[in-house]
Amino acid sequence: MTTTTAPSPRSQFPKQIPKDNQEARLAIARDVIRHVEGKRLLASRGLYISFHDYDLPWSDSFDNLAASLFLEDTSLECAVCAIGAACMVAVGLYDEAETLEHDWNQNILDDASPADISLDSDGMHEVLEKWFTASQLGLIECAFEGSTEYGTRHATESERLKASNFRHLDQHSSEETLIDIFQNILDNDGIFKP
């Protein structure tokens, strides 16, 4: 009897290669907006990436989980902050899951339930700094969280203050703020300008 295994979700789409960093940032911004508007990425302040309350079909592989999100697995939703959204999209567009795989596996080894795992920022910054500067990532975080506590090593206090006031968070939902940040990136040729 011959057994066949289902192909990895990742094998269903090829790795894209952007011609330059600007093209990558614009593609990431467009896809973040598309996935937020489609309710695949759920904007949530105070965390990076989390798959809460989901029965993970590929609990041993962040790569397969990330790929399934972008193959329109209609049962999968991912709670993200601005950096988490950009990272998930970069994983989907540019096959960057390997960088995050260690954090994912470590969380599983630490007996966390795969459905409750929330990744931290180190691996995500490593992925995103291929296309965004550390300063830009810090400002994006400041704008989404409404705080000056991000990007302290790479952006000035006045830049962080301006970014933290990008939207009055009490007047805009997390989704609106997330979309506005990535629309700003599109409007400014790939650079976030609060």
Image (cartoon, rainbow, N blue to C red):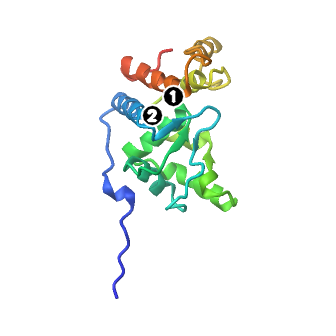
Identity of the residue drawn at 69% across and 61% down? 111
Callout 1: SS: helix
Do we see residue 128 in this rendering? Answer: no
- Marks 2 and 1, how far apart in space? 7 Å
The residue that mark 1 highlights is 175
Identity of the residue drawn at 32% across and 42% down? 17
Residue type at mark 2 is Val
For the view shown, which residue lies furthest in the bottom direction? 1
**Relative to the observer, which residue lies in front, 99 or 178?**
178
Residue type at mark 1 is Glu
Give the crowd class for mark 1: few <14, some 14-19, many >=20 residues within 10 Å: many
Residue 178 position (above or below residue 12): above
The number of numbered discs placed on residues in the rendered structure image is 2
**Relative to the observer, which residue lies in front, 50 or 190?**
50
Question: Which badge, 2 or 1, is on the more N-terminal residue?
Answer: 2
Q: Based on the displayed image, in which of its 4 quarters is residue 135 positioned?
A: top right
Do we see residue 154 in this rendering? Answer: yes
The residue that mark 2 highlights is 36
User: Residue 106 location, x and y as percent?
Assistant: 64, 57
User: Residue 11 location, x and y as percent?
Assistant: 34, 58
Q: Are marks 2 and 1 in contact (CB under 8 Å)?
A: yes
